[in-house]
Image (cartoon, rainbow, N blue to C red):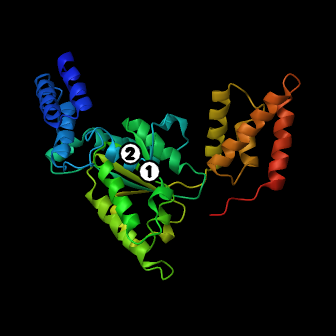
């Protein structure tokens, strides 16, 4: 860690909005960390400082201008969170687990890649029907990389006036360029639509062009994760922007079993039937529906204590489910 006096100066420069002092203090911390052989931390600090040096003196940086002009604007377009969900909480295929591990290694060892003239991948497209963990995987990636998670708020971005949507999009991207973060676009097809669609207006087509340009300009420490239920609606150029495309399909019977086992462990309750039996009866559900079924059983069980018969509850709920369930349409 840097000396206590440097940390105090860093805080003071931030509170006072003193950009020059802030830069000097960060440079001193970088030098000290290099002496300690903490090169990864020093490189990351230098990277952030270089980003600051390349910015103008307007409201691009939320930290300055007494605070938070740029940030206040960005808050209209972003929802910031720090997810608690981790990879071990999810039921994933081996290939997706390996991808996340490789992706995290690229991000955490970016300086080695750069020494060979390479950049880490920072754009991921998640594809699949609803309820199969696209948002959860994006949040788990943020947890794995220890990054803040910014979800794009479309209701704040989409405007009715010509050109205003692109202006708001520019403000959003100006802000995230100052952050090491994950930028998440849910239902990406709603904003990245095919420009050749005759039903779309010229404003939407200009928006897609602006969006692609902004994504291209993002530094590698900003990770873009986009999720879509309808990949066929995406503009062809969108596909080229993403270095990784992951398909999150409906769970297999074995994966539904894993969901049930995890739920039993987390809730400290045994359902009385084998997970394989319940999974067979739930065949065709998505991950979200499987978890919802487990919660429904537990909720009913808790409300019937002390006279609860868990096996009967499961039988009844499975019968109700099989009578009423209609497969989720893609």
Q: Which mark is residue 277?
A: none
Taking 25 as reference, is 147 left or right? right
- The image quadrant of residue 243 is bottom left
Q: Is residue 14 visible in the rendered structure shown here?
A: yes
- The one nearer the camera, 131 or 18, is 18
Image: 101 above or below 4: below
Number of on-image labels = 2
- Give the Cα distance between marks 1 and 2: 7 Å
Q: Quadrant of the N terminus?
A: top left
Q: Position of residue 250 (x, y in %)?
A: 60, 54
Q: Residue at x 35, y 43 (%)?
A: 181
Q: Residue at x 28, y 54 (%)?
A: 218
Q: Secondary structure at mark 2?
A: helix
Image: 237 above or below 139: below
**Crowd band around label 1 with a 10 angstrom C-alpha radius: few (<14), some (14–19), many (20+):** some
Return the residue found at the far right.
307
Q: Which mark is residue 76?
A: 1
Q: Secondary structure at mark 1?
A: loop
Taking 163 as reference, is 291 left or right? right
Image: 189 above or below 64: below
- Which residue has dot 2 on it? 72
């Amino acid at each position: 860690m840097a000396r206590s006096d440097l940390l105090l100066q860093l805080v003071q420069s931030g509170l006072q909005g003193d950009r020059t002092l802030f830069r000097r203090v960060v440079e001193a911390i970088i030098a000290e960390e290099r002496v300690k052989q903490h090169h990864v931390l020093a490189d990351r600090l230098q990277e952030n400082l270089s980003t600051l040096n390349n910015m103008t003196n307007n409201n691009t940086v939320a930290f300055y201008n007494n605070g938070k002009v740029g940030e206040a604007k960005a808050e209209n377009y972003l929802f910031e969170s720090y997810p608690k969900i981790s990879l071990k909480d999810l039921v994933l295929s081996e290939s997706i687990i390996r991808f996340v591990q490789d992706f995290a290694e690229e991000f955490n060892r970016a300086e080695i890649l750069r020494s060979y003239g390479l950049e880490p991948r920072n754009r991921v497209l998640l594809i699949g029907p609803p309820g199969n963990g696209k948002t959860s995987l994006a949040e788990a990636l943020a947890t794995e990389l220890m990054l803040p998670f910014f979800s794009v708020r479309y209701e704040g971005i989409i405007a009715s006036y010509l050109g205003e949507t692109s202006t708001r999009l520019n403000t959003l991207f100006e802000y995230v360029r100052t952050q090491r973060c994950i930028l998440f676009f849910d239902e990406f097809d709603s904003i990245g639509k095919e420009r050749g669609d005759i039903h779309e207006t010229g404003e939407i087509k200009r928006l897609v062009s602006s969006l692609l340009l902004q994504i291209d300009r993002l530094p590698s420490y900003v990770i873009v994760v986009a999720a879509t239920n309808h990949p066929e609606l995406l503009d062809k150029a969108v596909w080229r922007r993403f270095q990784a495309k992951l398909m999150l399909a409906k769970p297999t019977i074995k994966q539904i079993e894993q969901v049930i086992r995890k739920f039993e462990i987390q809730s400290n309750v045994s359902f009385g039937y084998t997970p394989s039996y319940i999974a067979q009866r739930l065949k065709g559900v998505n991950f979200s529906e499987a978890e919802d079924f487990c919660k429904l059983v537990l909720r009913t069980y808790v409300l019937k204590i002390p006279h609860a018969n868990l096996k009967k509850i499961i039988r009844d709920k499975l019968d109700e489910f099989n009578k009423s369930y209609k497969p989720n349409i893609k």
